[in-house]
Image (cartoon, helix red, strand yellow):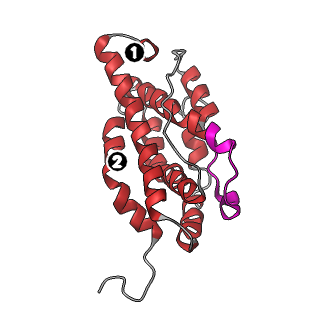
């Protein structure tokens, strides 16, 4: 029976279709239980988020999404790294994406969804002595407006023309770019080389 007679929630459909890639990224990030782990997290985030934010800024998003666009974080990630004395060049991981309206919904599903996990990460950063003024600027920005995820989900579920295949493909491509970014950092650590030397 299930959803018979009703429209499926796009949100939960996307969650089901992207769960494997989402979990792979979360596993790659790991817990932020030391300054070294947190610095690795900042590098990995900047590596895939900076090019994605530039790509989004260069395309026209659907009108329905204009009020729920995620706050750009790349510049704040750079500042957070600088707070911790990290001047290593980040090697960007660019996702192979199309920017159809449905694909953009998928991209924003990942970026807006990250605000949920940001609350826990903010707590972990706080336990390391990091704050909105030093080292955890981007996390403070992410959690500053807790209602944005609900607003996005409302627009997502109301989008009758959404192509779930396209949306899921783009969301998975973003998750995978993030996983690759962290894998590159780990490869560099194992070989004692900077990521930009790989």
Tell me the quarter of the image containing the C terminus: top left
Image vertical order of residue 147 relative to residue 176, above or below: below
Residue 47 place in picture, x, y as percent: 50, 29
Judge whether residue 102 is colored magenta: no
Could you tell me residue 136's position as x and y percent? 54, 34
Q: Residues within 10 Å of mark 1 (few under 14, many from 20)?
A: few
Horizontal side of residue 198 vs 134, given as left or right = left
Please tell me whether mark 1 sits on a helix, a strand or a loop: loop
Q: Nearer the viewer, residue 128 or 90?
A: 90
Quadrant of residue 2 within the rendered picture = bottom left
Q: Which residues fall within the magenta stretch?
A: 54-72
Residue at 43 percent of width and 85 percent of height: 6
- Circle 2 Cα neighbour tier, 10 Å, few/some/many (<14 / 14–19 / ≥20): some
Q: Looking at the picture, does residue 40 appear above or below residue 100?
A: above
Q: Which residue is mark 2?
A: 21
* Residue 112 screen position, x and y as percent: 54, 53
Element at label 2: helix
Q: Which x, y percent locates residue 159?
A: 57, 71
User: Quadrant where the N terminus lies?
Assistant: bottom left
Q: Earlier in the sequence, mark 2 or mark 1?
A: 2
Name the image quarter holding residue 185.
Answer: top left
Q: Is residue 129 visible?
A: no
Q: Residue at x 38, y 32 (%)?
A: 180
Q: Are marks 2 and 1 in contact (CB under 8 Å)?
A: no
Residue 5 seen in this snapshot:
yes
Residue to which mark 1 is pinned: 198
């Amino acid at each position: 029976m299930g959803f018979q007679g009703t429209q499926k929630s796009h949100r939960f459909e996307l969650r089901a279709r992207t769960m494997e890639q989402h979990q792979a990224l979360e596993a790659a990030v790991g817990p932020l239980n030391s300054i070294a782990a947190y610095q690795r997290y900042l590098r990995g985030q900047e590596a895939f988020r900076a090019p994605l934010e530039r790509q989004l800024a260069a395309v026209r998003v659907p009108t329905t999404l204009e009020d729920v666009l995620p706050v750009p974080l790349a510049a704040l990630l750079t500042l957070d790294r600088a707070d911790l004395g990290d001047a290593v060049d980040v090697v960007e991981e660019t996702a192979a994406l199309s920017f159809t309206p449905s694909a953009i919904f998928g991209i924003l599903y990942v970026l807006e969804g990250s605000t949920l996990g940001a609350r826990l990460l903010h707590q972990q950063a706080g336990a390391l002595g990091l704050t909105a003024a030093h080292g955890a600027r981007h996390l403070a920005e992410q959690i500053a407006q807790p209602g944005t995820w609900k607003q996005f989900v409302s627009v997502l579920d109301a989008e009758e023309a959404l192509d779930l295949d396209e949306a899921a493909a783009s969301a998975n491509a973003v998750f995978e770019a993030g996983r690759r970014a962290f894998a590159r950092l780990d490869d560099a650590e194992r070989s004692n080389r900077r990521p930009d030397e790989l």
